[in-house]
Amino acid sequence: MKNRIFLMSPAIFIMLAFGVVPLFIMLYYSFLSDGPSPTFTLQNYANFFQKAFYLKLTWKTIQMSLIVTLVSIVIAYPAAYIIAKVIQRGQNLLLLFIIIPFWTSQLVRAYSWMNLLQDGGILEMFLRKLHLIGDGSLGILFTQTAVIISLVHIFFPYMVLTMYMSLDKIQPSLLEASKSLGATPFETFRRIVLPLSKPGIITGSILVFVPCLGVFAEPRILGGPNGSVIGTVIEDQFFEINGWSFGAAIAFILLVMVFLSIWITSRLVKRGD
């Protein structure tokens, strides 16, 4: 037992030093007033909940995160199923192609989408070649649609990988037994494949939804003046306005939202079981 504690001590120290302690520092600053002589106050939290602007922005961020999560599920599930159950060879190569975007910065990918979605850009010229749009501009850049497209591209691999791992664990004998008992492909999917792949869907949803709550670079680059989310407000408080205490309060509220979303998800999973 002592040897286990000794071997785990470096990991525990790193977790406490770089994970737990910064959270308590942020919590401490969130109860201080801004100014040359900070005092203990609850005004930072009161300002957040009393101003409709921050509440609307929070709801907008939650909506955007939900849309990105749902779109990622719709796209990733068929892709993961094909890789796990349909394709016999080249699975590792396909997974490599999905992982490749991880090797580039999120900022690089955001600016790449900016060049692609801008009026007169590659996407607009391609659609005009196919006669899918007229002479008008595409009008996607600097909208929430552009932000959602970028975030789906950025977080899509998390969803595919978690779903693939769940689908790959499903034994082919279960599918063959279902077929031999006269079940249709849809019944097999509904009663066997979907329930057994639910852990991958839940895990992937958390890995997509939670980071989306705190993004700030992509909405600022691709959303333009209308791209403000709660993450951009936190960034402005820390780096533009020097409102560290209010920024810490908003960040801690966002952290509570993250924990709350994970708790709700776990409760839904247990209820479904």
Image (spheres, rainbow, N blue to C red):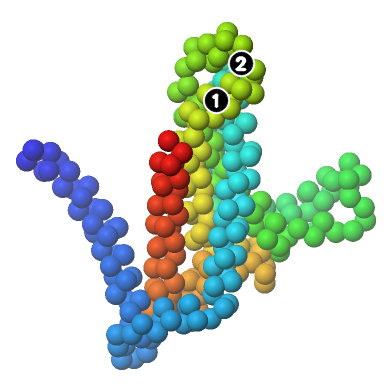
Q: Secondary structure at mark 1?
A: helix
Measured along the vertical axis of the image, is residue 167 above or below residue 6?
Answer: above
Q: Position of residue 17 (x, y in %)?
A: 24, 59
Mark 1 and 2 residues: CB-CB less than 8 Å, in contact?
yes
Quadrant in which the N terminus is drawn: top left
Question: Circle 1 sits on which residue?
Answer: 191
Task: Name the residue at 49% across, 71% down.
Answer: 235
Measured along the vertical axis of the image, is residue 89 above or below residue 54?
Answer: above
Q: Quadrant of residue 35?
A: bottom left
Q: Is residue 106 among what the camera can see? A: yes
Find residue 142 and name its label.
Answer: none
Quick check: 46 left or right of 78? left
Find residue 183 and name its label.
Answer: 2
Q: Position of residue 29 (x, y in %)?
A: 32, 76
Label 1 to label 2: alpha-carbon separation: 10 Å
Task: Name the residue at 22% across, 47% down.
Answer: 11
Q: Quadrant of residue 64?
A: bottom right
